[in-house]
Image (spheres, coloured by chain):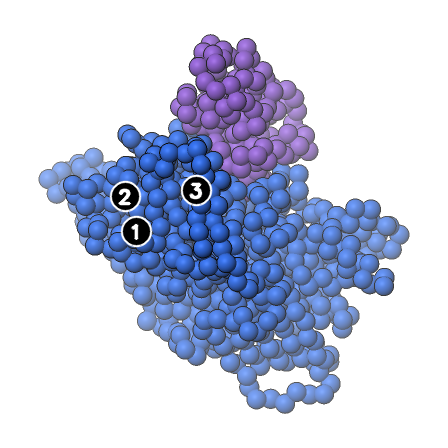
Chain colours: A blue, B purple
Amino acid sequence: MKSIRKFDAVPKLNGSWKFLDDYSYQGMIFGQLLYSTCHHGIIKDIKFPAGFDLQEFTFVSAKDIPGENIVPEPECDQPFMAEKEVFHYGQVIMGITHSNLRILREFIKKTGVEFEELPAVTDIKECLDNEKNAFGKELTIDHRNGQKVDPTWIYHHKIYYTPHQEQAYLETQGMIAIWKPAEKMMFVRGTAQCPFFVKSGVESIMGKAAEKVEFETSEGIGGAFGGKEDFPSLLAGITALLSYKSGKPVKTVLDRSDDIKITTKRHPSRIEIKSWTDPKSKKIRKIDIDYRLDAGGYQTLSPVVLSRGVLHAIGGYDIPDSFIRGRLMRSNTPSNGAFRGFGAPQAFAAIEAHVENIAADLKIDPLEFRLVNLLRKDAEFPTTQLISEDHLYDCLQRVIEKSDYQKKVKEFKKWNETHKDKKGIGLAIGYHGGGYTGNGEKVLNSEIKVIIRQDAMVEIYVSSTDMGQGAHTTLAQMFFETIDHPREKCRVQLPNTSKTPNSGPTVASRTIYIIGNLLHDLALEIKAELGFENLEEYVASHQTEFPQEFRRNFIPDPSVQFDEETYQGTGYKDYSWAACVTEIYYHADTYKVELTKNWSVLDIGKLANPKIAVGQAEGGIVQGLGYGLCEFFYKPGFGRMHGFTDYTLPTSIDIPEMDIEFIHTDSEIAKGLGEIPMDFPAPSVRNAVLFALGIQINEYPMTPERIFKSLTADER
Amino acid sequence: MKINFLLNKKPVTIDVDPMKRLLDVLREDFQLLGTKESCGEGECGACTVLLDGKPVTSCLVNVIQAEGKEVLTSEGIAEEPLGKLLIDCFDETNAVQCGFCFPGFLVSSYYYLISNGELNLEKIKKALSGNICRCTGYQKIFESVLLACERK
C-alpha cells in the first residue's frame, strides 16, 4: 500500500474546503442555546432582558417538541431540553434564534434564569469516592479461580484518578437545519462523525411532524475525536425544531466558551486496584479492580464506555485470578461521552501505574516485571478469550531495543546522583480491541455501496465520515489499489443519510478495520463477478451495462461469541498492540516536566496508507502525552472554564521528538488505529516522573503543582 | 465608518462598524472563508493573518486597526510562490488532517519563510507555537516547513 496524497489537503489549505460555518443559505438566521448555569435545581423563572423586540426572536423549549424529548442513545435518559428540573451545568433549556448573531448572543447573555437550587455533586472525587452516587447497570468480569492467598504474597492497594479531558476539536460544534414544509422534510447539515445517529436524533424530536429527515455532513469536519459522536444529535434536534418553528434555515454554531462548558468530555475515573504478588517468581497472582467512571448528569452512552473500560482494565498482563467490577457514578456536570480510547486510556493509566508501583516497591526492574507478567500468546483475558499472537511482546522488545532503554536507565540514574534537575524514562504498554465490543458488529450489520459509472468512475457510498483522519482517502485507496484502478477514478461520496447506506458510526477504530476491509473484499468480488483484468477497459467495452450498483454487508465471524451478561467470550476479534518509552527532563526550580523524546512501536496489521498512519499515531500520542502531562479542568463546575486560555493543550514547543514504528505490517488485514495511540502515552509520562523523582503520583496529570505537592508531602 | 486597506494586494473600502473584528469582516463582508474562528480569544491561531507583514490573530483585531494597512490572508498567500511551495510540502507529507487550523499554519509558516527561513527545527517550533493543532501532533507540520525551507 502506498502513501498517496490526500484528496482534500490542497483545498483545506487554500481555504476553499467548506466547514459548517462556511455554509450559508437564502434567508438563513442564527440559533444559539440558553443553558443552565445551575448544577441541580428547579427552573423557577426565565427573565428576558429589556430593550429587545421579542417578536424578532424564535424560542423553543421542551413544550414545543412535537416528538419525544429524548436523545436516542444506548441509554435513553437525556432530554433535548430540560422540562422543570436541571441535572447539570450546561443542560439546555431553550433554543433561540435571531437574524443577527451578535444581538442573539447579547440577548442570551443578559437573559436570567432563576432556579431553586438543589444539592449537587460537582467535585470529581466527591462523585467517584462515594458509592451512593452509582447509577445504571454494574458490570463484572469474574475470573477468580478460588485459590487461597499465600501469606508470602505481597499485597498492594492503590487508587488511581484521571481527570476530564476535552476533545478540543478546532472546529466547534455546529448544525444547520432547513425545514421544507411542502415536503414535510427536515434537511440537516452538520459537523458530526455519525450521520445516522444525527438522523435518529432529529427523527426523535420531530416525531410525526416530519415525514422525512435527511442528514448530510459538511464537506470538512474540523476534528471530532469522539466529541462529535453524540452531542451533535442534541444540537441537530434543537436546531431542527428552531427551523420548524421559525420557518427559516437556522445555523447554530457554538462559540468556544459554550462548547467547552456544555459538550461531552472524557470520563474522569477512579480505579482502585488490589493485587497480590509472589516475590519469588515476581508474578502477580491475583488482582481485584474496581473501575468507576463519572458519567455526568445522564448515562447516555457511558454504559458502552464502561464496557470497553472493564474489558481493558487488566492491561497487558497474564494474571490467573482476577475480578473486575465496573460502575458509573453520577455527578451534576455535563454528561461525559466518547473520546478516542473510550474507557481504555483510563484503564491503562491505572494498571500501568500500578505495575510500576509494585516494581518500585519490590525493587524489581520495571521492564523485567512486565516481561514476567506479560500477556503472551496462548494466555487468556479475564473473559477467557485466548491471545492468538505474541505481538505485544514484540512491540515491547522492539521499543526497548530502539530506545536503548536499559543503557539509558543506567545513565540517567548516574546523572541524577549529581544533578538537581533530574532525567526520567518511563515505559508503558497498551492494546485496543478493534470495532464494536462483543457482538456489536454483528448487530450493526454495516452495509456499503459502490456505483461504477459509464466513464469507469467508481463512487463509494459509506456513512463513515472523514473528520481529518484521512478516512475518505484511505477507504478509496483500499478499493482502487485492490483492483489497480486509477485513483482519480475513485471517490468516496459525502455521507448523506438518503444516499449512503448505513455502514455504522465513525467510531471504535472501526472505519478502516471494518469498512476498509469490506471495500477491499467488495473490490475483489466485483472483479471476480465481472471477470475483468482492467476495469476501465471492461467498462469501455460493456458501456450499456453501466452504471451498475454493488452492495455488500459485513459478514460476522461465527467464532466471535460474547455473553453480554457474564462478560465471557470474545470481547474483540482483533487487537492492536503497542509499547512506548518516554524520556523526560525535570526542572527542579519550576517543578516542570519537559518531554524530551518518545519512542512508540505499534502493531496495527497492514498499513493502508503509511504516511497517514504515522500522522494518526503522532496526533494520538500527543493527545495521550497531554493527558499525562497538562490537560485537566481546574474546576469541574464547568461555568468556571472559559476556553483555550484555561484548558492547556500541548503546543509545538511542548511536545517531544517522536519516533514511531509499525511492526507486523505484512499482515493480511488492517486492524484498528484510531484509538490505540491514545491508550499508552499518559502512564509513560507518569512512570518517567516516578523514575526521576522516586515519587508515586497516582493522580493524573503530572502538573508542576501536583509534583510540588507530592514532593513537599514527602518532606513533611 | 468607511475603512480603507489593502486586502490580498487589492485596495478595498468598506463601510462598517469600526469595532467589528477583522475576522468577521474577512469572513462576512469579503467571503474569505479560509480564515477560521476557533477559540475567539487569540489562543489558537486559526484566524491568523498578516497585518502589514506581521502575524496577528484577527479575532483580537478591530477592523479600524487595519485602516491604511495591508492585510494578507491564507487565500492571498496561496497565490504567492512561497505559499504555493508550502502548500505542496504540506500535501506531500500528508500533514493535513482535519485542516481547520491549517490556513492559520500556512500564514505562520509563510511568515517564517519570509522573515527567517532558516533550516532550523527549534526556530520553526517557536515560530509556530502560536498555532494550536489537535489532530497532527505537529511533527508532520515541522517536516513540511523544513522541506519548504530546503526547497525555497
Query: For the point 58% across and 60% down, which residue is it?
Result: A122
Instruction: Check disc 3 and report its element: helix, strand or loop.
Output: loop
* Residue to which mark 3 is pinned: A48
Query: For the point 64% across and 52% down, which residue is it?
Result: A634
On the question of residue A625 being in view, the answer is no
The answer to whether marks 2 and 3 mark residues whose Cβ atoms lie closer than 8 Å is: no
The answer to whether marks 1 and 2 mark residues whose Cβ atoms lie closer than 8 Å is: yes
Relative image position of residue A145 (x, y in whole percent) = 55, 86
Q: What residue type is labelled 3?
A: Phe
Q: What residue type is labelled 1?
A: Asp
Relative image position of residue A194 (x, y in whole percent) = 36, 51
Q: Residue A33, which numbered label?
A: none
Instruction: Check disc 1 and report its element: helix, strand or loop.
Output: helix
* Residue to which mark 2 is pinned: A245
Q: Residue A64, which numbered label?
A: 1
The Cα atoms of the two marked residues, 2 and 3, are separated by 19 Å
Image quadrant where one finds the C terminus of chain B: top right
Same subunit, labels 1 and 3: the answer reads yes
